[in-house]
Image (cartoon, grey):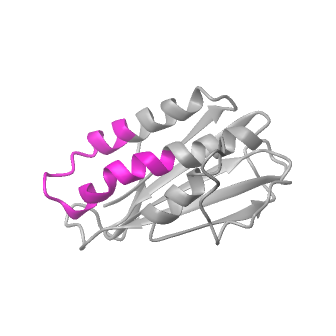
């Protein structure tokens, strides 16, 4: 089975570790067998969750929404903020910030870990207005026998 789960978190820095804990609990609850190719990306997925949720909390106004899909050959994470959509979407060329920069490394990390990623404006965000969705996909080394092409919503 392909699993799909989503959460809504308040627009607060404390939502970042909360988001990681929720993803970790969902993955554990799916009881993926040891050695399954899907498990190869779990640690990287947690890092990506932290980076994308952290960025969303910089731009959101009320809440952020996060959706995780785990398919037979990849995991896809989407994080949607309810900000005014003014942040830059020049994300395809993530370059390392200067050594003394206080921020700017998150998307470099996402770019290094994800097989593909991007951002797009959203006309329907958590609050029903404008927003930005940033997504990342992490591909497994081989097809997982635990997950299939057909998706189902998972209870959380």
Q: Quadrant of residue 70?
A: bottom left
- The residue closer to the viewer here, 141 or 78, is 141
User: Relative to 57, is 136 above or below?
Assistant: below
Query: Can residue 6 be seen in the rendering of this structure?
Result: no
Q: Residue at x 19, y 66 (%)?
A: 145
Residue 24: x, y in percent? 36, 39
Residue 26: x, y in percent? 36, 41
Q: Is residue 122 left or right of residue 43?
A: right
User: Relative to 104, is 57 above or below?
Assistant: above
User: Relative to 9, is 88 above or below?
Assistant: below
Residue 15: x, y in percent? 58, 30
Q: Residue at x 32, y 51 (%)?
A: 42
Q: Which residues are magenta?
A: 24-49
Q: Residue at x 75, y 50 (%)?
A: 125
Q: Quadrant of residue 35?
A: bottom left
- Image quarter where the N terminus lies is bottom left
- Image quarter where the C terminus lies is top left
Query: Can residue 129 be seen in the rendering of this structure?
Result: yes
Q: Is residue 105 left or right of residue 76?
A: right
For this orientation, the residue located farthest to the left is 34
- The residue closer to the viewer here, 154 or 141, is 141
């Amino acid at each position: 089975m392909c699993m799909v789960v989503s959460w809504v978190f308040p627009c607060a820095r404390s939502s970042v570790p909360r988001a990681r804990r929720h993803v970790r609990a969902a993955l554990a609850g799916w009881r993926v067998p040891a050695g399954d190719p899907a498990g190869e990306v779990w640690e990287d997925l947690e890092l990506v969750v932290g980076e994308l949720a952290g960025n969303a909390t910089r731009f959101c106004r009320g809440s952020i929404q996060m959706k995780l899909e785990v398919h037979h050959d990849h995991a896809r994470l989407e994080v949607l903020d309810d900000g005014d959509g003014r942040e830059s979407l020049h994300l395809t060329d993530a370059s390392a910030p200067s050594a003394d920069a206080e921020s700017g490394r998150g998307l470099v990390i996402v770019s290094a870990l994800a097989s593909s990623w991007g951002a797009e404006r959203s006309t329907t965000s958590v609050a029903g207005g404008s927003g930005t969705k940033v997504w990342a996909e992490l591909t497994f080394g081989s097809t997982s026998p635990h997950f299939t092409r057909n998706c189902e919503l998972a209870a959380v």
